[in-house]
Image (spheres, rainbow, N blue to C red):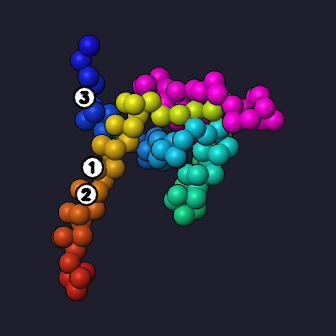
Amino acid sequence: MNAPDLQSFLPLPQTQFHVLVALTEGERHGYAIMGAVEESSGGLVKMGPATLYGTLKRLVDAGLAEESDRRPDDDDDQRRRYYRLTGLGQQVCHAEADRLADLVAITRTNLRPGLA
């Protein structure tokens, strides 16, 4: 079986990248993902449930994330669905981060201090 071409996933839509980044810290349920996205974006990105679960469905369908059967403890609400990155999801998240870092480096080079 051939390894998927990571570039075929790029550029990731902003919401998908934010969710993948939130999942780099480990398994999370939907509400925790929404909070992590808001926190990591400094409050600039706020996801509602419809956006979040639509994004998670696309990520799961693409093989970048998966639903987890594990529960953090017995007292956890059984209705919560937990998600985690797949190996492919980790690779794609890393490739997107590299792509964006390259773009930032180009921008910083081109916008030297004192020229703007």
- Give the foreground label among 2 and 3: 3
What residue sits right under mark 2 in the picture?
Answer: 103
User: Is residue 73 in view from this perspective?
Assistant: yes
Looking at the figure, which quarter contains the C terminus? bottom left
Indicate the secondary structure of the residue bearing disc 2: helix
What residue sits right under mark 3 in the picture?
Answer: 5
What residue sits right under mark 1 in the picture?
Answer: 99
| Lower sequence index among marks 1 and 3 | 3
Say above or below: 112 vs 75.
below
| Residue type beneath disc 3 | Asp
Marks 2 and 1: CB-CB under 8 Å?
yes
Q: What segment is highlighted magenta in the picture?
A: 51-80
Which residue is at the far top? 1
- Residue 55 magenta: yes
Q: Could you tell me how many numbered marks the image carries?
A: 3
Q: CA distance from mark 2 to mark 1?
A: 6 Å
| Residue type beneath disc 1 | Arg
The residue positioned 28% from the left and 50% from the top of the image is 98
Indicate the secondary structure of the residue bearing disc 1: helix
